[in-house]
Image (cartoon, rainbow, N blue to C red):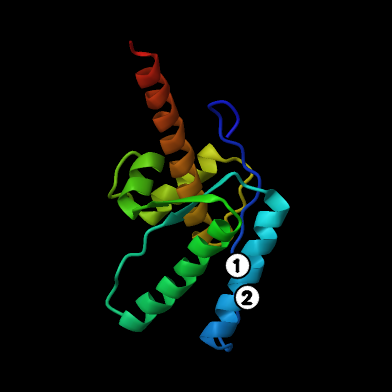
Amino acid sequence: MEGNRLRHLADGVIATDSDESVPARLCALHHALTKLIAEHRPAEAAVEETYVNRNGAATLKLGYARGVALLVPALAGINVTEYGAKHVKRAVVGTGSAEKAQVAEMVRRLLPGATLRRADASDALAVAICHAHTRATTTRYSAALAATP
């Protein structure tokens, strides 16, 4: 974020080989995230909270990957904030019940230049937008409270 404007830096998806074991895939995720943090040097990170679906095994594997996504920035000394899906949708589209296509369209409008080759990239950028908006609001609110006699 520059001032009160968002600026697109990069987007993409970290894909792992589904033929690999879960530990190997988590290791690949760890290495890729570590490389991205070294390359982009973010000051903060944001991760979407996990939702539970009917497939318990898939939810568990998603939880493993999410754990890595929380751990890597934390190990780098980066503050990590988590947001629920409805919070993200509200921040980006204006309603917590927005469809994926609506979120993707708003991400494209807010971040011209984003390639969004996969829905996961759109989701990740939506979390980043949500975090930027939330942080800006929190910062202004804190400043206003501090200025009040």
| Closer to us: 44 or 127 | 44
State the image quarter where residue 25 is shown. Answer: bottom right
Residue 59 to residue 18: above or below: above
Instruction: Give the x, y percent position of residue 73.
Output: 56, 57
Q: Residue at (60%, 77%) from the top-left corner?
A: 27
Is residue 30 among what the camera can see?
Answer: yes
Estimate the x, y position of residue 82 in percent, counting from the top left.
40, 53
Residue that mark 2 sits on = 28
SS for callout 1: loop
Viewer-closest of 40 and 71: 71
Going by the picture, which residue comes out furthest to the top?
149
Do the numbered discs 1 and 2 sit on residues whose CB atoms are within 8 Å? Answer: yes
Q: Mark 1, residues whose alpha carbon is within 10 Å: few (<14), some, or many (≥20)?
A: few
Q: Is residue 64 above or below residue 3?
A: below
Mark seen at residue 95: none
Which residue position is annotated with label 1? Answer: 14
Residue sitting at x 51%, y 68%: 68
Quarter of the image that includes the N terminus: top right
Q: Does residue 55 appear to the left or right of 125 in the view shown?
A: left
**1 vs 2, front mark:** 2
- Residue 89 in the image, given as x and y percentages of width and height: 36, 47
